[in-house]
C-alpha cells in the first residue's frame, strides 16, 4: 500500500515554500527574452508558436483576435477567456505548452499591459489540461505581474504541488484580487498553505477552494481557514464547497466570524452540516454585520436548522441579503418559518428553497410573498402556478451561482438572476 506523505497538523503555522523546481520542457527552454511583439496579440501568439514549433490553436487565435478588437475600441477591464468548456464553438483544450505561450503574452506584450494597466484584468483558463507544471508558469507570471487582477483555474488538475506554487506566489504578489483553484485536486498541505499566507496577504478579496482532496475526519481545513478569518481583514468572498465540513467545522468557522469584519459571501455548500451547526450560525447572525450572502445548499439542516435561522433573521439580523437552503431536507414547518422571517426582515431579498419537501402551506406562503411583491421572481428559484384551485411551485433557473459549472446554450451566462451571489457582492469578475 502506498504511504501517504505526512501532512502538517492543525497547529502548524510554517509559511509555505514553493515545491522543488519542475524540469523545464524543451519547448520552454529557450531564452524567455525572445522577440518582442510588433503587432496585436494574435500576431504575437502566431510568432511565438512558430518560434517554438508549437501548434497554433484556432480557438486561442480567435479569442486573441477578439481581445485585439476590444483594445482597438479602447475598452477596459479585459479578460482573456480561454475556458475549455465552451459549447458554442469547437474548443481544443489548453495544455501546459499553450499556457506557457499565454503567460508569455501576458508578461511581455505592451499592448495588453498598456490597455489594462489602470483597470481590472483577468485570465480564465478553467477546465483545460493544465497541470502543476502550468501552475508553476502562472505563479512565476504573477510574482511580477501587477495588472492581472483575477485568475480562474477551475477544473485543471494542478493538485497539491500546483496549489503550493500559487500559495508561495501570494507571499510576493500584491495585486491579484481573486483566485479560483476550485476542483483542482488540491491537497490538505496546499489548503493549509493558502490559509497561512492569507493571514498576511491583504490583497486577495475572493478565494475559491472548492473540492480539495482531503483525508481524515479532523476537519483540518476549517481549523486553519477559521484561524485565517480571525486575522485577515481583506477577504470578502470565500468558497468552501465540498470540504466535508461537519458541525464541529462549522463551529470553527462561526467562532472566527465573531471577530471577522470583512467577509460578505460565505459558501459552505455540499457539506455535512446539520441543525447543530445552524445553532452556531444563527448566533453569529445575531451580532455579525457584514455577511450578506450565505450558501448552505446541499447540507442537511432540516426543520430545526431552518427555524434557528428564521428566528435570527426575523428578530436580529438586518444585513443578510441572500440565503440558499436548496436540498437541505427541510419540510413545510421550516420553509414557512423562513418565509415568515421575510415579512419582518426588510433586508433579506433573495431566498432559494428548491429540493426540499413542499407542502401546501409552503406553496401558499411563497406564492403570497411573490404576489405581494415582497419576494421578486428573479430573487428566488421557485415560481407559483395554480392547477384545479391548488397552488404549486415550479423550479426556475435562478440561484447564487447557477452557471458556475456550466454555461447555457443561449441567453446571458452571467445574468444577475442566475448569479445573484456575485451580483450582490461584486468583487471583480465572477469566480
Image (cartoon, rainbow, N blue to C red):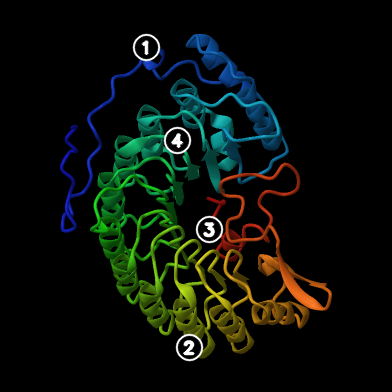
User: Above or below — where is 245 with respect to 125?
Assistant: below
Q: Are marks 3 and 4 in contact (CB under 8 Å)?
A: no
Q: Earlier in the sequence, mark 3 or mark 4?
A: 4
Picture disc at residue 156? 4
Picture disc at residue 316? 2
Distance between the alpha carbons at the discs numbered 2 and 3 = 27 Å
Q: Position of residue 263 (x, y in %)?
A: 43, 67
Picture disc at residue 427? 3
Q: Earlier in the sequence, mark 4 or mark 2?
A: 4
Q: Is residue 267 visible?
A: yes
Near mark 3 (Cα within 10 A), the count class, few <14, some 14-19 or many ≥20, is: some
Q: Earlier in the sequence, mark 3 or mark 1?
A: 1
The residue that label 1 is drawn on is: 26
Q: Earlier in the sequence, mark 1 or mark 4?
A: 1
Distance between the alpha carbons at the discs numbered 3 and 1 = 39 Å
Lateral position of residue 355 relative to residue 216, left or right: right
Task: Name the one closer to the observer, 238 or 337.
Answer: 337
Distance between the alpha carbons at the discs numbered 4 and 2 = 42 Å
Amino acid at each position: 500500500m502506498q504511504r501517504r506523505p505526512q501532512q502538517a497538523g492543525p497547529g502548524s503555522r510554517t509559511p509555505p515554500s514553493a515545491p522543488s523546481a519542475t524540469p523545464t520542457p524543451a519547448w520552454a527552454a529557450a531564452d524567455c527574452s525572445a522577440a518582442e511583439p510588433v503587432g496585436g496579440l494574435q500576431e504575437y501568439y502566431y510568432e511565438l508558436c512558430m518560434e517554438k514549433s508549437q501548434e497554433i490553436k484556432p480557438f486561442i487565435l480567435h479569442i486573441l483576435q477578439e481581445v485585439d478588437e476590444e483594445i482597438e475600441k479602447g475598452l477596459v477591464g479585459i479578460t482573456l477567456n480561454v475556458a475549455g468548456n465552451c459549447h458554442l464553438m469547437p474548443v481544443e483544450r489548453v495544455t501546459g505548452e499553450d499556457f506557457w505561450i499565454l503567460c508569455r503574452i501576458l508578461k511581455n506584450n505592451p499592448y495588453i499591459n498598456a490597455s489594462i494597466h489602470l483597470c481590472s484584468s483577468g485570465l480564465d483558463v478553467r477546465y483545460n489540461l493544465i497541470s502543476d507544471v502550468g501552475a508553476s508558469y502562472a505563479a512565476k507570471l504573477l510574482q511580477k505581474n501587477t495588472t492581472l487582477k483575477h485568475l480562474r483555474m477551475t477544473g485543471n488538475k494542478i493538485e497539491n504541488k500546483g496549489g503550493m506554487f500559487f500559495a508561495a506566489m501570494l507571499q510576493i504578489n500584491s495585486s491579484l484580487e481573486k483566485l479560483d483553484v476550485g476542483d483542482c485536486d488540491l491537497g490538505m498541505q496546499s489548503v493549509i498553505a493558502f490559509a497561512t499566507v492569507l493571514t498576511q496577504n491583504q490583497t486577495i478579496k475572493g478565494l475559491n477552494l472548492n473540492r480539495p482532496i482531503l483525508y481524515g475526519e479532523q476537519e483540518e481545513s476549517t481549523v486553519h481557514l477559521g484561524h485565517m478569518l480571525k486575522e485577515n481583514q481583506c477577504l470578502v468572498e470565500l468558497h468552501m464547497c465540498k470540504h466535508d465540513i461537519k458541525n464541529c467545522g462549522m463551529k470553527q468557522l462561526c467562532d472566527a466570524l465573531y471577530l471577522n469584519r470583512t467577509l460578505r459571501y460565505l459558501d459552505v455548500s455540499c457539506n455535512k452540516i446539520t441543525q447543530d451547526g445552524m445553532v452556531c450560525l444563527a448566533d453569529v447572525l445575531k451580532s455579525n454585520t457584514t455577511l450578506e450572502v450565505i450558501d448552505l445548499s446541499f447540507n442537511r439542516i432540516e426543520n430545526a436548522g431552518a427555524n434557528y435561522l428564521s428566528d435570527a433573521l426575523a428578530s436580529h439580523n438586518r444585513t443578510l441579503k441572500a440565503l440558499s437552503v436548496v436540498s437541505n431536507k427541510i419540510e413545510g414547518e421550516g420553509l414557512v418559518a423562513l418565509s415568515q422571517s421575510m415579512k419582518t426582515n426588510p433586508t433579506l431579498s433573495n431566498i432559494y428553497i428548491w429540493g426540499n419537501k413542499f407542502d401546501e402551506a409552503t406553496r401558499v406562503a411563497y406564492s403570497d410573498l411573490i404576489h405581494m411583491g415582497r419576494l421578486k421572481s428573479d430573487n428566488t428559484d421557485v415560481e407559483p402556478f395554480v392547477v384545479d384551485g391548488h397552488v404549486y411551485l415550479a423550479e426556475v433557473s435562478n440561484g447564487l451561482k447557477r452557471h458556475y459549472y456550466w454555461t447555457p446554450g443561449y441567453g446571458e451566462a452571467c445574468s444577475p438572476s442566475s448569479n445573484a451571489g456575485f451580483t450582490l457582492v461584486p468583487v471583480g469578475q465572477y469566480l
